[in-house]
Amino acid sequence: MAVIFPRFLNSPIPLSSLASSLAPPSPRLQFFSSSAPSSSSPMEIAPQKYTDFPFVSAPHRNLMVDLVSTMEDRLDSQLKPCTLPSDVQYYYTPSGNSHGSLYIRSGHTSSPVDFVLGSWIHCKLPTGGALNITSLSTYLNASTDAPNFLIELIQSSPTSLVFLLDLPPRKDLVLYPEYLNNFYENTRLESLRQTFEELPEVQPYYSSALYIRCLTSPTSIMIRINTEGAGEGRMEEIIKGHVHPVAKDALGIWLDRCACGHRNVDEAGKAYLEARDGLIKNKTIEIDIGSSFPSLFGPDIANRVLEVIREAYNG
């Protein structure tokens, strides 16, 4: 499974509300992150990088920066530099209501990593708040059948967060029990998932897209965190004390067993993986991005960014 730009069609905020947020900004609208830069005029908007994460809380930012730096520390020699155009690495609407950043590093020919893809999106909402979504995904190529890695945080208010974390399988877990044992049963992924069951603020999150659900692993974390009435700062406490360490551990498992582990894949297996991965990538653009992204950023920005994503997907 690939999550590049957040799945707006299945997000906690209706797409109609997101699209309407592209209207000229109202002075009453406030960012829920005190660190968010001012955007009263497009001329005042300073360029941002993916690793800046300028619109989220400090614990949220620290989490994402830690994951990106950890991944790059382990995989840097296997990855090419990010060479995206500046207007794709950071983009925003003329109204200043919607901002986004894209980060892609392709793997070298000798690397099992196809590419690393990160993004964040910030959209003002008519309700007076903002939607912030940050994500980091890694895709392996057909030289290995190991799972990919995915993390996404969707925050629609200071007290509401959807947290998605998974190592999506690339083989059928029923037909290949060794795959299930190696990557899921014989790791700590299930115990990491279970830690969230102890938190009263946590409820399961179910994507409305059945296609998305069938791509996840049995140890996937798909939860909604609601801290309304739990006291000021509780969301930041959960991100710092629970989300961050769990995500860091899951990334470590993925790096050790998947990105840096050795798997033998024959020619038939490679053909199967290439076909399966290609289908999932194309479907991701169709249901995750294609219809929602133009509504948020307009056709010009959407076409520019989507073209870069398609190029990464098609190698």
Image (cartoon, helix red, strand yellow):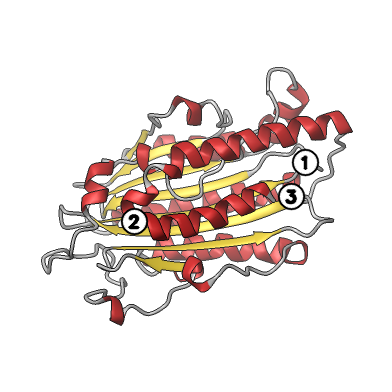
Seen as rendered, the residue at the extreme top is: 175
Distance from disc 3 to disc 1, alpha carbons, whole Å, reads 12 Å
Say whether marks 1 and 2 touch (CB < 8 Å).
no
Is residue 177 visible to the viewer in this orientation of the structure? yes
Q: Is residue 183 left or right of residue 34?
A: right
Looking at the rendered structure, the secondary structure element under dot 3 is helix
**Residue that numbered label 3 is attached to:** 259
**Residue that numbered label 1 is attached to:** 142
Distance from disc 1 to disc 2, alpha carbons, whole Å, reads 35 Å
Question: Which residue is located at x 68 percent, y 23 percent?
Answer: 173
Is residue 186 visible to the viewer in this orientation of the structure? no
Residue 298's disc is 2
Mark 3 or 1, nearer chain start? 1
Mark 1 or 2, nearer chain start? 1
- The image quarter containing residue 163 is top left
Where residue 42 appears, as percent x and y from the top left, is 29, 75
Looking at the rendered structure, the secondary structure element under dot 2 is helix
Where residue 95 appears, as percent x and y from the top left, is 25, 67
